[in-house]
Image (tube, grey):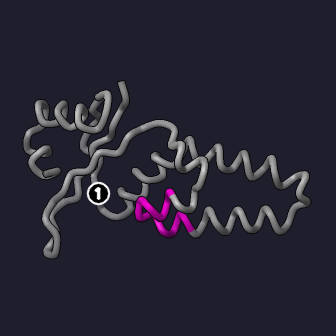
Amino acid sequence: MRVWTVHVRPPDRNRPPRTLLVRDGFAFGAFLAPVLWFAANRLFALAALALAATVALGALLPPAAAAPLLLGLQLFIGFEARALQSWWLGLRGWRTEGVVMGRNEDAAFLTLASARPDLARLAA
């Protein structure tokens, strides 16, 4: 079973409220290509920060030292990418409303719908 956090964007004058599920755990895509993963999830500042850190490590350190540090950075990003996504949503005004479990996103959504139908309606 996978764990999903439930995030809710409160209503705004320009946008209706919305619910989003963010899976907890290792993000393999963020490990392989952190900049692309951050950009695909609309985390552009984090994508720029990851790119700047990669370029700085590659430029400032000799290749023998840069390679393991870059691998370590990518491993760290893989483990923390979804937590960073949740944190970034919080900065943009989204509230964390709860945690649900499910085999996949659909099963987690059904769990959410049975426990909190009001939030499930916002996700549709």
* Front one among 68 and 106: 106
The quadrant of the image that shows the N terminus is: top left
- Residue 62: percent from the left, percent from the top? 91, 60
Q: Would you say residue 73 sits in the magenta stretch?
A: no
Total residue callouts: 1
What's drawn in magenta, residue-wise? 37-47
Relative to 28, is 90 on the left or the right? left
Residue at horizontal 11 percent and vertical 31 percent from the top: 114
The picture quadrant where one finds residue 110 is top left
Callout 1 crowding tier (Cα within 10 Å): few <14, some 14–19, many ≥20: many
Q: Is residue 119 left or right of residue 97?
A: left
Q: Is residue 44 magenta?
A: yes
Q: Position of residue 32 (x, y in %)?
A: 60, 49
In the image, farthest residue toward the bottom: 14
Vertical relation: 73 (above or below) 41: above
Q: Main secondary structure of the magenta part?
A: helix
**Left or right: 71, with 109 as reference point:** right
**Residue type, label 1:** Trp
Q: Residue 103: where, in percent of width, then height?
A: 32, 28
**Which image quadrant is residue 79 in?**
top right
Residue 90, position in %: x, y?
36, 56
Q: Say above or below: 95 vs 2.
A: below
- Tell me what residue is drawn at x 49 percent, y 60 percent: 38
Residue located farthest toward the top when viewing the structure as drawn: 1
Which residue matches tag 1?
94
Q: Secondary structure at mark 1?
A: loop
- Could you tell me which residue is drawn at 34 percent across and 64 percent down? 92
* Residue at 16% in and 70% down: 15
Q: Is residue 39 above or below residue 14?
A: above
